Image: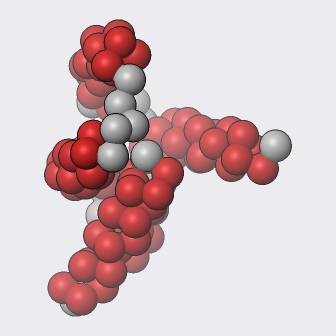
Amino acid sequence: MPRFKIAIFGFIAGLCNGLFGSGGGTVVVPAMVHLANMKEHDAHATALAIILPLTVVSSFVYFRSGFFQWDVIWEVAAGGAIGGCIGAWILNRISTYWLRKVFGFFMIIAAIRMII
């Protein structure tokens, strides 16, 4: 895949991350699977490494604008770290079929939440 297309996907993922506070994975994972022909498991794992710098940069901008609520951050981050470990453990054990179904289900739920 040409580097320019990859950079475009990165730009769109960063834009979603900056605008919505998340969403990079919903752009990056399908792009890597369908356009870069990456295996589903590899795309999900790689997306995490891609989203990390996007999140750091977006968080810095939000922090400078005064949008952080520290009491909430620490509690959610603690739960998120535990959930992240469990999710990574499950990723290594789930079939591609079920991974795709679960990811699609979460994308549909997120879309419905945004519309309602």
- The residue at 26%/78% (across/down) is 6
Numbered-mark total: 0
Residue 36 visible from this viewpoint: no
Q: Quadrant of residue 63?
A: top left
- The residue at 70%/47% (across/down) is 114
Residue at the extreme right: 116
- Vertical placement of residue 2 versus 112, above or below: below
Quadrant of the rendering where the C terminus is positioned? top right
Quadrant of the rendering where the N terminus is positioned? bottom left
The one nearer the camera, 62 or 90, is 62
The one nearer the camera, 28 or 74, is 74
Q: Quadrant of residue 34?
A: bottom left
Residue 109 visible from this viewpoint: yes
- The residue at 35%/31% (across/down) is 68
Relative image position of residue 71 (x, y in whole percent) = 35, 12
> In this rendering, would 95 be left or right of 82?
right
The one nearer the camera, 6 or 91, is 6
Q: Quadrant of residue 84?
A: top left
- The residue at 60%/46% (across/down) is 107
> In this rendering, would 58 be left or right of 101?
left
The chosen color scheme is: secondary structure
- Vertical placement of residue 107 versus 33, above or below: above
Relative image position of residue 29 (x, y in whole percent) = 39, 57
Relative image position of residue 79 (x, y in whole percent) = 35, 12
